[in-house]
């Protein structure tokens, strides 16, 4: 099992959710976050002055999936979150040691 963590633009969330449904993923956790990438934020002009906005609002999507669909999940997120402009986001894939479903007490994963 893997954890897929995607940092995306808020306005791409609906598209990402739809794309994930298409590859059979329904379970997810979504967090409102603030972050920055390689550019350390952006520079905006406010009342004639340049202001650096360091941490921008982002959405973090957390999904735990079986190894055999990780590639499809990553592809789906990339396609749905892409605009081509800086700030489109990042995706991280992490190994998962163990997972359980509380109601049935079952251990998850192949
Ligand atoms: N190294 C990192 N660690 C944790 N979060 C990160 C990291 N890099 C980016 N992020 C998250 O991803 C969001 C979007 O990053 P962003 O798309 O600007 O990355 P980038 O590498 O600068 O790419 P681009 O050149 O397209 O802007 C950030 O606001 C932050 O939430
Ligand atoms: Mg960036």
Image (cartoon, rainbow, N blue to C red):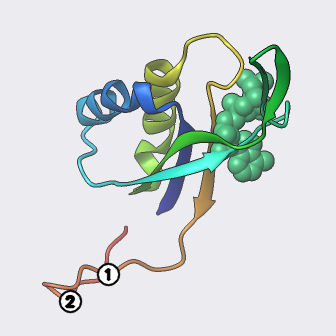
In terms of secondary structure, where does tag 2 sit? loop
Whole-percent x and y of residue 68? 43, 47
Query: Which label's residue is closer to the chain start, 2 or 1?
Result: 1
In terms of secondary structure, where does tag 1 sit? loop
Residue positioned most to the front? 47
Toward which corner of the image does residue 28 lie, by quadrant? bottom left
Toward which corner of the image does residue 39 lie, by quadrant? top right
Residue 101 to residue 69: above or below: below
Mark 2 surroundings: few (<14), some (14-19) or many (≥20) residues within 10 A: few
Tell me the tag on residue 8. none
Image quadrant of ligand 1 equals: top right
Q: How many numbered badges does the structure rendering display?
A: 2
- Marks 2/1 in contact by CB < 8 Å: the verdict is yes
Taking the spot 26% from the left edge, 28% from the top edge, the residue there is 18
Taking the spot 23% from the left edge, 47% from the top edge, the residue there is 26
Tell me the tag on residue 100. 1
Whole-percent x and y of residue 8? 53, 35
Toward which corner of the image does residue 21 lie, by quadrant? top left
Residue closer to the observer: 106 or 103? 103
| Residue that mark 2 sits on | 105
Separation of marks 2 and 1 at Cα, in angstroms:
7 Å
Q: Within 8 Å of ligand 1, the CB of disc 1?
A: no
Q: Is residue 22 left or right of residue 86?
A: left
Whole-percent x and y of residue 11? 42, 25
Residue closer to the observer: 70 or 53? 53
The quadrant of the image that shows the C terminus is: bottom left
Whole-percent x and y of residue 31? 44, 54
Q: Is residue 61 left or right of residue 19?
A: right
Residue positioned most to the bottom? 105
Residue closer to the observer: 93 or 85? 85
Residue positioned most to the top? 84
Q: Is residue 17 left or right of residue 48?
A: left
């Amino acid at each position: 099992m893997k954890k897929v963590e995607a940092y995306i633009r808020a306005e791409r969330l609906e598209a990402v959710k739809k794309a994930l449904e298409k590859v059979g993923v329904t379970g997810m956790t979504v967090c409102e976050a603030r972050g920055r990438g390689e550019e350390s934020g952006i520079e905006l002009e406010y009342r004639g002055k340049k202001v650096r906005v360091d941490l921008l609002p982002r959405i973090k999507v957390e999904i735990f999936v079986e190894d055999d669909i990780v590639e499809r999940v990553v592809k789906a997120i990339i396609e749905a979150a892409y605009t081509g402009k800086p700030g489109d986001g990042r995706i991280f894939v992490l190994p998962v040691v163990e997972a359980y479903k509380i109601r049935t007490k079952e251990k998850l994963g192949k």
